[in-house]
Amino acid sequence: MASNNNLAPYICIILSILICITPNNIFCHAAKTSGYTRSTNASADMPAEAFPAPPGFNAPEQVHITQGDCGGRGVIISWVTPYKNDYASIVRYWKACDPKHVFKARSRVYTYSYYNYTSGFIHHATIHKLEHDTKYIYELGHGDSIRQFSFTTPPKPGPNVPYTFGIMGDLGQTYASNSTLGHYMANKKGQAVLFVGDLSYADNWPLHDQRKWDTWGRFTENSAAYQAWIWTAGNHELDVAPEINEYVPFKAYKHRYHVPYKSSGSTSPLWYSIKRGPAHIIVLSSYSAFTKYTAQYNWLEAELKKVNRHETPWLIVMMHAPLYNSDNYHYMEGESMRVIFEPWFVQHKVDLVLAGHVHAYERSVSPRLNYTIVCSISCAKLLSYRQTERISNIQYNITNGQCTPIKDQNAPVYLTVGDGGNIEGLANNFIEPQPSYSAYREASFGHAVLEIKNQTHAFYTWHRNQDHEAVAADSTWFYNRFWFPKDESSL
Amino acid sequence: MASNNNLAPYICIILSILICITPNNIFCHAAKTSGYTRSTNASADMPAEAFPAPPGFNAPEQVHITQGDCGGRGVIISWVTPYKNDYASIVRYWKACDPKHVFKARSRVYTYSYYNYTSGFIHHATIHKLEHDTKYIYELGHGDSIRQFSFTTPPKPGPNVPYTFGIMGDLGQTYASNSTLGHYMANKKGQAVLFVGDLSYADNWPLHDQRKWDTWGRFTENSAAYQAWIWTAGNHELDVAPEINEYVPFKAYKHRYHVPYKSSGSTSPLWYSIKRGPAHIIVLSSYSAFTKYTAQYNWLEAELKKVNRHETPWLIVMMHAPLYNSDNYHYMEGESMRVIFEPWFVQHKVDLVLAGHVHAYERSVSPRLNYTIVCSISCAKLLSYRQTERISNIQYNITNGQCTPIKDQNAPVYLTVGDGGNIEGLANNFIEPQPSYSAYREASFGHAVLEIKNQTHAFYTWHRNQDHEAVAADSTWFYNRFWFPKDESSL
Ligand SMILES: [Fe+2]
Ligand SMILES: [Fe+2]
């Protein structure tokens, strides 16, 4: 006689077949390496004509916003104009519910040269003392070039403030990139984007064609002008080309994408933190010095001690190169940082470590199938579903042989969301057998959404571009390490 | 009946007792952790009065030289003057054997400010196209402040060019530092110094008292004005102090100690290479970015491929933080670099990896006692002598559990010579039991000497300050990895 347990797969298959008829609002906890077959021929950049400059004299373009202070009452509004004049530098803004009280702010203006390219005038205006959780309208330009946008400030940081983040990385400006961004924007839940690095891929072009930065700014404006994108620098932001005497790392990135690093005591825009709603978000630089005694190390050590989980229960760390990755592409490139920072992440009970770089999707923890466990596409995979626990690998001391990841309830979940679209194709060469630290991996383009519900629970979904946006190819609940340090795989 | 083997210790003891009567010219392959008792109260800085400025108006001071090009026909002569004028910027030089032909070179002049300090005028004059293996006299200053020095250029790089390097690190300007430098200078063999970082320890003083850089320059002039010191930056060169708005890393170091980094295609003075006599010497920065895609990583990858062991048989890598260290002080601080660069060092058969940072002395490989094996001080240690083989630890792939150092004949010897004198005291807290990668370790101040004899053999000695210079507390032969890849422990 079959036990209950042995019957489960059959019940599941039957359920799946039934439910797959209505693919929306249902989720599949796919197991191991997803066998989903995806197109790889979407990796060509869209032509420049796809990203025309806006009409009108000296029209502001490439508009994007990010958080402008530590707690969310500030916004940095950035844009580019072909010429410099007084009109071009002004942003007018007002509360959507109070259009009669218009405020003004003036940008600081930057330009940079790179080989044979000279940038337009890059404006950054930091606005302070906005009200929390409030919709603002803002306006740039003059005369026939006026452009209007809006954003909503995040709620005051607090323990039970729901907030939803999109997660994207390695976006580029290919047809796949366009699909990813379109999918993300079609999902109306996302209130801000956690971007894990590799923006324009300008450096993949001859002479690091800086015009690709301009087209990328136009491409992403549809989202980035309306909600804060929280920036992380990737390797493609290094943008160094000794062969054409371009030695300054992060030149375009630093000029074009400002972040509020000083408000967290950082001395570099490449590492900083913000508090946004229920989350304390720490951004690190995989491509700057981070060993002991360096500025990044010292800053992170101090920063982690400052995190107040009573104010911001969710602690999220972002970087470009993943610390855990099971793709042969970029395998172990995060080791240098892992060996030095992973003990801190465990000690401080970091909830999520987000990375990109690998042009695929991967997640380290799989809960038990205890929520609405149904299936959209890869139903059969339920059969090979496995629960994967939080792990750490911090016991190694050179001589003790203890270098295998082990179960650790204080460890973060590792997410690699480097599947934005890039220009180099997908990283579909996974290591077999799938390591213990890998719960789900798939070489498809897509993005993720993190819905923080309260101080204990967050619902997380990953969306592949081939599906309708509402379909989650991968989804799970994450439990807060500080307030609800339960094993996702045992509840 | 005792076998031959069992008799060996007794024979050794008798031999030792006999030979210890004449301590000079004899060497002891001490085993494991040396129990030599050393004074630890020598770690106070000498007073500023110990380092007076030279007499005369605008007298050049803090004179030091380093190699000025890739192959050894260039020299960078550096000095400081209180004022700036035409006289102060000129160096006159001539071959010692041809004093009638006087050449002139003009310095580039730099100053820097640091909090409430403004430097003197720091001169760097690069002289090119000198003859190899030739003694030159050079003269700085004017009128009653003229000062004369000399140096000998290295022989043309070649496979069988003997050359002797001193090795010092973490020198500082304490009484112990003075003893170390005095011991090194008393040994007339050293033709150039490989300095593994941590120079003045100015940053240990309130407000990072930059006058300590001046006194250090005066202190080391006795040697550094006469032979090239090959510089490596240590953590004390970072010299960053956010609390007084000093954010620029390596500010004093970069202004005061120029190196010929451009001639090796480097884009930063913090990593570079030179060829000097029989050695290709690569200098790395433990405190700059070095992960994949960064400038240091790209440079090192290309640099290792350029090494021509037919021209320079000995390949030496210098850095500040050791990759192998068995002292609890700074334990595993080199891991971030080890996990990324050790495979390259093994692949390219690096002969020696030199580091400092740990304020003690350590060596990773012990040959068999096959040369003139006699004993100076710690005779009894022969009883616990152990042969220690070259090891590597490069098989680890996260999941295979292979993280224990294993025998590897392609691996370099690791030397930690961070025992120059510093200001923080000795690091006398060794990990027990002594790991397999540690052959000899001792928390005493001292320096080392590497006598490259030919393309296959180099004789290496370490000298503790308490001994007469001619005594080598530790000594061994090293065999070239490219030309004579034999196991030192089996010959
Ligand atoms: Fe990347
Ligand atoms: Fe150090």
Image: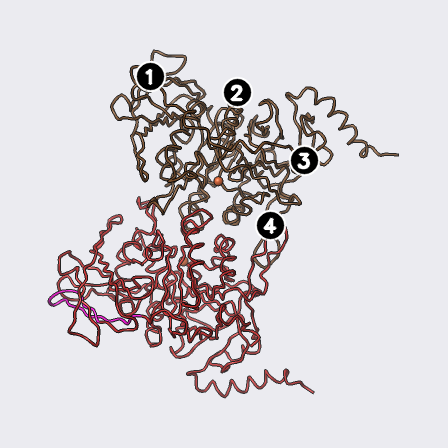
Chain colours: A red, B brown
Mark with earlier residue (2, 1): 1
Mark 2, residues whose alpha carbon is within 10 Å: few (<14), some, or many (≥20)?
few
The chain identifier of the residue carrying mark 3 reads: B
Cα distance between the residues tagged 1 and 3: 50 Å
Q: Nearer the viewer, mark 4 or mark 1?
A: 1
Query: Which residue position holds label 3?
Result: B31
Q: Which residues are magenta?
A: A137-153
Residue B83 in the image: state x and y as whole percent. Answer: 27, 26
The chain identifier of the residue carrying mark 2 reads: B
Query: Which residue position holds label 4?
Result: A398
Q: Is residue B15 magenta?
A: no
Cα distance between the residues tagged 3 and 2: 28 Å
Amino acid carrying label 1: it is: Ile
Label 4 and label 1 in one chain: no
Q: Circle 3 — which element? A: loop
Quadrant, the C terminus of chain A: bottom right
Mark 1, residues whose alpha carbon is within 10 Å: few (<14), some, or many (≥20)?
some
Query: Which residue position holds label 2?
Result: B188
